Image (cartoon, coloured by chain):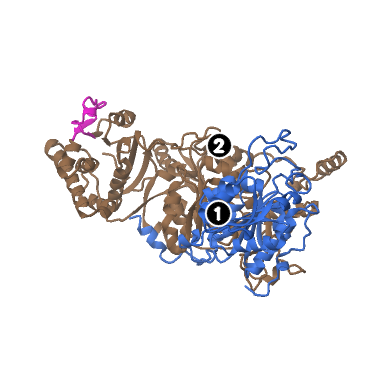
């Protein structure tokens, strides 16, 4: 790892095709800054991206990366980290990828607590398929497939995370560049699963959860007396439905990552050019 | 006096049938007798009928047969379930003092041996040992030296303390003594022992051991019958070699975790059965287009849907061969014996890494539940070779960078295989994706790049055909007019069947095919035969279909895969061109 890595080193030469003004630009910039400022470089970083507008991030960033199957980014990230704990693993996706088709993996990734970060670009809409309701869309949000609104409450991913035994839960906002980068950086530095939900507005298909809405509604936890080590305080904030908070909601300072608990010590990539020493003992066990 | 002896213990699930059967099988194995076991079982924890069957001989045994010589029946149903396999010399051991066994009728001329299993077990220290009393009784009936049982009892109960082991040895002797005293008759069985020392293992264990030997360090899976034994075998053991087993939340996750580990450079595997392979299908395409080496093991059971989870079937051949939308290169390898489960697993990992593509390792329930004896040299670890393919490191990565210093992870090499840089390699950073991509791994819809990448991936199959030996295993009479072809676990039963046929004057040539794709070309063999019979454990003949396909007259083909539909004028031109070209040239 070199110390002179700049965040632009994580930028590829591919121009993003996101709509002008898309929240994902800011989200990605913050991710790159957080990676650079935590001493990582593209050659030791592995990005896993889901499917959707957010999933394109693997192409626009420069690192080792896999852009996978819809909803399965987290299991890929877990496999990468388990096989080589020396890598910095960051998984990224959208609200559909993470909380709908991948919701099952989300809760299990949270409770597994592998040392990686998970940055979700939550725009409360399906953008790439041109504007259908997402799991975080409001109950009365009218879309082409929900003309009267979804008629079901949105998922609360932070509450899901807390209930699943999360060790790090944060909320960020793509338009607040500095705070966003700081929050993602904290997630990267966390010893365990660093979950950051990012409000990343869709300027094309969501005219309700807009930049203006978030700017007005958001409260920075740094400007309150919130104590992120207090799980009860975190629970109260997460369940408050009429407020949008920004910052680290909860962090368990004693978190020990799964791979450490499981005794994984180094990269699994290197193996001998024949059966490993002692392999014949495996045969003898069958006597 | 038959050369082989067929022994079984049956009762309700939860009666300790499996562990008792295994103790006996191990004792036989340690006494230098060959063993081939099978199980009748139901998918439930308690209740229902279950049996553990052992066929044993001083010669190798490769199959089960429809004949039962010694039956330990813990329930009346056990006798009924096996009625057809009993004969006049059969001996049935049961506890006539049990209220549920009062009215037992022994079929035909078989010998009923009433042994108060429970009472004798209580005398030895506890009713729980009644199965071991029955084993002692079986030793007396079969003339098998009871000392051979002691070692297996020590292995089974050693961690429970010496007193328990001694009580069990005593229980066995009480059973033996009771039969000797109460049934003072010569039984027509005499199990010889030899100086050989065999190991006893099943197909799932052989796959797990093969994986560890081959350097597999990451396994992720979701428990499912009959693949769970692979996972249970590797758990704890792979850790001793720096690896890890992770139990995933479902098979979607299991295959993606394994994919991630393989991207990170580890040799990785997942194993499942029918319902799990259905879920994993979603990721087959990604594994192939991201060119990730991955071994996907399918231990087949009866389908479709939940089917008959504890019954045998070879019904997933088409699924592993064709599963997933779109078209991908893949290898399908199906070991034909328990020991081949080991060697084909080793080969699967080499194929996966040499060609950077998914390898389906297809086994089945019959091998998964069969414990078979082998001399330990069968699994000579010195014979294991590891081939990792085109892995590049810091020293040679420059060769694979484009003009702008970017690593070409999907370089369109002549042999179809690109360089592979493990994450962490300096200057190797690159992305890959399930989207069609260019040589740098970046998405594209460019029609020419699309064709270049599809062709490049497909070329791996041709390269493998040239470099690998995808041959069949041949048995029987090479000049026979009758040709029998089979795949997977049927090899043993067919080999023994051939001997029976030979006794009746039938000469048969038998080809056992472990490679489903790419597979050996059997055209010449089929043309040389008068009758060709394909044997497989399924209803529709999936392997027969592809064998027939292979020997069909060839059609000429027009294919288009650049993402654009056919156009009328283009088709007219293409058809004219095809007609003007000799058929051979278009194949």
Q: What is the letter of the blue chain?
A: A
Percent from the top left, x then y, of residue B122?
17, 41
Percent from the top left, x then y, of residue B31?
27, 52
Q: Which residues are magenta?
A: B93-115
Percent from the top left, x then y, of residue A117?
60, 59
Residue B258 is tagged as: 1
Residue appearing at x 60%, y 44% in the figure = B281
Number of marks in picture: 2
- Could you tell me which quadrant the N terminus of chain B lies in? top left
Residue B495 is tagged as: none
Helix, strand or loop at mark 2: loop
Q: Does B504 lie within the magenta span?
A: no
Q: Residues within 10 Å of mark 2 (few under 14, many from 20)?
A: few
Subunit that carries the residue with mark 2: B
Give the residue number, with chain letter if any, for mark 2: B530
Q: Does B109 lie within the magenta span?
A: yes
* Left-right relation of B585 to B319: right
Percent from the top left, x then y, of residue A105?
57, 48
Of B391 and B106, the residue lying toward us? B391
Residue appearing at x 66%, y 45% in the figure = A96
Quadrant housing residue B3: top left
Of B526 and A253, the residue lying toward us? A253
Q: What is the letter of the brown chain?
A: B
């Amino acid at each position: 790892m070199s110390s002179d890595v700049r965040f632009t080193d994580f930028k590829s030469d591919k121009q993003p095709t996101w709509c002008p003004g898309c929240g994902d630009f800011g989200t990605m910039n913050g991710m790159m800054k957080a990676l650079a400022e935590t001493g990582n470089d593209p050659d030791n970083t592995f990005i896993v991206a889901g499917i959707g507008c957010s999933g394109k991030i693997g192409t626009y960033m420069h690192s080792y990366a896999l852009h996978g199957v819809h909803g399965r980014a987290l299991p890929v990230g877990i496999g990468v980290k388990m096989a080589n704990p020396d890598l910095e693993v960051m998984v990224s996706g959208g609200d559909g990828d993470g909380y709908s088709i991948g919701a099952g993996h989300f809760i299990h990734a949270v409770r597994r607590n592998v040392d990686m970060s998970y940055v979700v670009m939550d725009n409360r809409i399906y953008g790439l398929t041109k504007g259908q309701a997402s799991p975080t869309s409001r109950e009365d949000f009218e879309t082409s497939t929900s003309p009267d609104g979804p008629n079901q409450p949105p998922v609360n991913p932070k509450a899901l995370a807390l209930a699943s035994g999360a060790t790090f839960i944060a909320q960020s906002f793509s338009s607040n560049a500095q705070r966003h980068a700081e929050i993602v950086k904290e997630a990267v530095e966390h010893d365990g699963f660093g979950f950051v939900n990012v409000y990343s507005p869709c300027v094309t298909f969501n005219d309700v959860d807009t930049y203006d809405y978030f700017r007005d509604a958001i409260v920075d936890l740094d400007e309150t007396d919130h104590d992120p080590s207090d799980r009860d305080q975190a629970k109260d904030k997460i369940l408050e439905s009429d407020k949008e908070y920004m910052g680290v909601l909860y962090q368990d300072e004693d978190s020990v990552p799964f791979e450490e608990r499981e005794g994984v010590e180094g990269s699994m990539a290197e193996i001998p050019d024949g059966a490993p020493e002692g392999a014949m003992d495996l045969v003898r066990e069958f006597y | 006096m038959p050369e082989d002896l067929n022994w079984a213990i049956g009762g309700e699930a939860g009666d300790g049938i499996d562990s008792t059967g295994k103790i006996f099988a191990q004792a036989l194995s340690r006494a230098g007798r060959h063993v081939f076991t099978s199980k009748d079982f139901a998918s439930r924890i308690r209740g229902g009928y279950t049996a553990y069957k052992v066929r044993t001989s001083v010669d190798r045994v490769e199959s089960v047969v429809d004949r039962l010589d010694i039956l330990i029946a813990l329930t009346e149903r056990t006798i009924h379930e096996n009625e057809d396999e009993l004969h006049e010399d059969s001996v049935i051991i049961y506890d006539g003092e049990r209220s549920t066994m009062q009215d037992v009728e022994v079929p035909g001329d078989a010998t009923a041996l009433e042994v108060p299993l429970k009472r004798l077990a209580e005398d030895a220290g506890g009713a729980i040992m009644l199965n071991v009393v029955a084993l002692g009784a079986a030793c007396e009936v079969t003339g098998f030296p009871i000392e051979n049982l002691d070692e297996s009892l020590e292995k089974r109960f050693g961690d429970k303390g010496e007193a328990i082991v001694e009580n069990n040895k005593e229980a066995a002797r009480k059973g033996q003594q009771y039969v000797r005293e109460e049934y003072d008759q010569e039984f027509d069985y005499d199990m010889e022992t030899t100086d050989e020392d065999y190991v006893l293992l099943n197909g799932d264990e052989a796959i797990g051991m093969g994986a560890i030997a081959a350097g597999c360090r990451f396994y992720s899976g979701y428990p499912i019958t009959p693949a769970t034994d692979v996972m249970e075998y590797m758990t704890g053991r792979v850790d001793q070699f720096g690896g890890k087993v992770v139990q995933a939340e479902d098979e979607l996750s299991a295959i993606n975790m394994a994919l991630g580990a393989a991207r990170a450079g580890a040799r990785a595997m997942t194993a499942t059965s029918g319902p799990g392979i259905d879920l994993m299908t979603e990721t087959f395409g990604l594994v192939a287009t991201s060119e990730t080496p991955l071994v996907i093991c399918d231990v087949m059971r009866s389908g479709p849907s939940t089917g008959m989870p504890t019954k045998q079937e070879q019904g997933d051949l088409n699924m592993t061969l064709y599963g997933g939308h779109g078209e991908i290169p893949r290898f399908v390898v199906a070991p034909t014996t328990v020991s081949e489960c080991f060697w084909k697993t080793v080969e699967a990992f080499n194929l996966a890494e040499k060609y950077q593509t998914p390898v389906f390792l297809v086994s089945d329930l019959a091998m998964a539940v069969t414990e078979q004896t082998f001399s330990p040299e069968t699994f000579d670890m010195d014979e294991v070779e590891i081939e990792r393919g085109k892995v590049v490191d810091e020293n040679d990565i420059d060769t694979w960078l484009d003009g702008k210093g970017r690593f070409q992870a999907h370089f369109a090499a002549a042999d179809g295989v690109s360089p592979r840089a493990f994450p962490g390699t300096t200057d190797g950073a690159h992305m890959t994706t399930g989207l069609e991509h260019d040589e740098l791994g970046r998405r594209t819809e460019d029609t020419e790049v699309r064709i270049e990448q599809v062709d490049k991936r497909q070329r791996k199959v041709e390269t493998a055909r040239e470099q690998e030996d995808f041959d069949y295993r041949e048995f029987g009479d090479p000049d026979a007019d009758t040709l029998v072809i089979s795949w997977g676990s049927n090899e043993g039963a067919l080999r023994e069947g051939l001997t029976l046929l030979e006794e009746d004057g039938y000469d048969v040539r038998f080809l056992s095919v472990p490679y489903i794709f790419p597979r050996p070309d059997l055209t010449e063999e089929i043309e040389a035969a008068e009758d060709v019979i394909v044997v497989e454990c399924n209803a529709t003949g999936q392997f027969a279909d592809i064998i027939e396909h292979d020997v069909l007259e060839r059609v000429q083909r027009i294919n288009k895969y650049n993402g654009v539909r056919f156009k009328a004028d283009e088709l007219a031109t293409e058809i004219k061109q095809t007609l003007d070209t000799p058929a051979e040239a278009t194949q």
